[in-house]
Image (cartoon, rainbow, N blue to C red):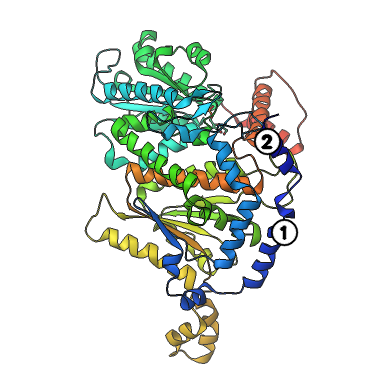
Amino acid sequence: MSSFLEQMAQQRHAAINSTPVWARLHQHQRATRHVHMRELFEQDSQRFHRYSLELDGLLLDYSKNRITDRTLELLLELADAANLGQWLQWMRDGERINVSEQRAVLHTALRQPAGSRVLLDGVNVVDQVQDVLAACSRFAEAVRGGDWRGHDGQPVRDVVNIGIGGSDLGPLMVHEALRPYCQPGLNVHFVSNVDGQHLAQTLEQCQPATTLFIVASKSFTTPETLLNAHAARRWLVAAAGDAAVARHFVAISSNRPAVQAFGIDAANMFGFWGWVGGRYSVWSAIGLPVMLAIGPEQFRQFLAGGAAMDEHFFRAPFARNMPVLLALLGIWYNTFYGAHTHAIMPYDHGLRRLPAHLQQLDMESNGKRVGRCGERLDFDTGPVIWGEEGVNSQHAFFQLLHQGTRLVPCDFILPLNSHYPQGDQHRVLVANCLAQTEALMRGKSEAEVLRELAHLPGDELDMLLPQKLFPGNQPSNTLALDRLTPYTLGMLLALYEHKVFVQGVIWGVNSFDQWGVEYGKQLAAQLLAEMDGKASAAHDASTSGLMRHFQERFHG
Ligand code: F6P
C-alpha cells in the first residue's frame, strides 16, 4: 500500500471532531460569541493592516470577522490537526486523493506554464496539457481570424457551447466576466438546460451557415447535453445537410469513442483527462468558448492568474495564505457558530454568474455527509452557497442580513476600477459595497437611533426604536481586485477552488466526487422509461399521482 493510502486510512481513526483543538474552538466560541466587532475595531487601530493581505492586485480584507489572534491561532492548529500541509503535498504529487474514484486531482497542472513538470505515474502531464492548449489556440485563431469556415464558406459569427454543470457554469461565468475582452462580431452562447426553450431561443439568434457548436461533456454521456446536441445537429442538417456537421460541430471530451459515435471527427475533438474534475475544468479545453471570445493570449493570462494563486497557496505560510484563511474563517462560522449559509456578493455586473459557479464548486465538492473513508460524519459540512450581484441584492434580501435572526457570513467582491465607468456610477457602486460591509459589521446602536429619533413623542419612539436598531456583528470578507482582468479573475477562481479543498481536508470529505447527483439521474431515466411504456415501477403516492396528472394533461 502507498504511504498515502496507509496514512489516509489512519486518519479514519482520528476524526477531526475528537481532537482537543476542536473542543477548544467550541469553548473559545462560547467565550467570545458576545464580543462585538465594533469593540475589536475600537481596541485595535491596526486591525485592517493586521487582518488583510494582498497578492498581485487582489486584496483580501478579513478584518470584519468575529475573530481575534487567539481564534486564528486555534483555527491554524485545527488545520495542522487535519494534516493540511501533507494534503497539499499529496495533491501536488499526483496522489489519487479522489479516493472513491481512484483519481489524482491535478487541475493546477492546467495552469502551469510550458516547461513545468507535474508527474502522474511518471508522465509529465504538463506536456499533454500544453499540446491541447496549443491545439485549442490554433483552432481559436482560425475561427477568430475567419480562416475556419462553415459549409458554404462563410466565417463563424455565433458559437454555441452545449454543456451542463462544470461544462457550462465555469466558461459561462468567465465569458460574462471578461466581456470587455471579447472579440466584437463573434457571439458566444451557452445552452445547458434540457428544457427545449433554452436551445430554441438561442438558435433564434443564429444562422446555420455561420454557427459553430461546441459539444462540451467530459463523459459525453450526460443526457441533457446529448439531447441538446442532437437537436442542434437536426437544426443544422435540416438547413445544410449531413456533410455540414464536420464544419459546424466540435467536441470537448475525454470520451473519444462517444464523440466519434455522435459523428464528430476525432480531429475536431479537444481532450481532457480523468484527473480534471468537471467543476475544476474551465482551465482545460472546456475553456475553449472563452478562448474563442477573448483569444489565446488573454486566455493564457487567465491561466497565469490561476498559477499565481497556486504558487501562493502551495508556498505561503498558512497564517498568511489567502485560501487557507478564507477556508478557516468559513469553518469558524459553519462549524462552530452553526451558520448554515455563505453568501457571495459580487459588486460587478460581469461577475453576476459567479455565485452560480461557486455554488457548484462548493456544494458539489463539500456537500457530503460521510468522510472520505466512508465513515458517517456527525458535524455539519459544506454550507449553502448563494448570492447575487450588488447593488441589486441590497434591494432584495439585505433586509434579512441587517435585521433578521440569522448569522450569514458574506464575501464582497469588488473591482476597484471599471471597464465601463459611466460618469460617477462606479464610485457610487464602490460606496454602496463598502457601506454594506460597514453597516453589517457596526450595526446601529440604541444611542445612535435615539439621537435620530429624539424629536418623536414617547409612544411613537417606543414603537420605532427597536425597528430602527441594527445589531451588526455580521461578518464579511472583502476581496478587492484592482480591475477585473483575465489575470485577476484567474486568481479569484483559483482562490475559491483552494478554499473549498482546504475545507474538505479539514472536514475529512472527498471534495472531488459527486455521488449525490447520480440517484436523481437514475430515477429520471426510470420515470422516462415508464412514460414510454417500457417499464413499470412502484412509486410513492405523490410521485404516482403527479405522473398520472402529467400523462392526462400532456399534449405532446
Ligand atoms: O452534475 C454532475 C456532473 O457530473 C458534474 O460534476 C459535471 O460537471 C456535469 O455533471 C457535466 O458532466 P459532463 O461534462 O460529463 O457532461
Which residue of the protein is positioned furthest toward the top in this rendering? 243
Q: Nearer the viewer, residue 227 or 288?
A: 288
Q: Quick one: quadrant of the N terminus?
A: top right
Sequence-wise, the earlier of marks 2 and 1 is 1
Which label belongs to residue 20? Answer: 1
Residue 549 appearing in the image: no
Position above or below: 326 against 208:
below
State the residue position of label 2: 546
Q: Residues within 10 Å of mark 2 (few under 14, many from 20)?
A: few
- Asked where in the image residue 237 lies, by quadrant, the reply is top left
Question: Please, what is the three-letter code of the amino acid marked with disc 2?
Answer: Leu
Please name the residue shown 72% across and 55% down the image.
Answer: 19
Q: Position of residue 345 (x, y in %)?
A: 45, 55
Q: Nearer the viewer, residue 278 or 386?
A: 278
Front disc: 2 or 1: 1
Q: Position of residue 142 (x, y in %)?
A: 27, 21
The verdict on label 2 being within 8 Å of ligand 1 is no
The answer to whether residue 533 is left or right of residue 498 is right
Q: Position of residue 326 (x, y in %)?
A: 51, 54
Position above or below: 185 against 10:
above
Please name the residue shown 48% across and 52% down the image.
Answer: 321
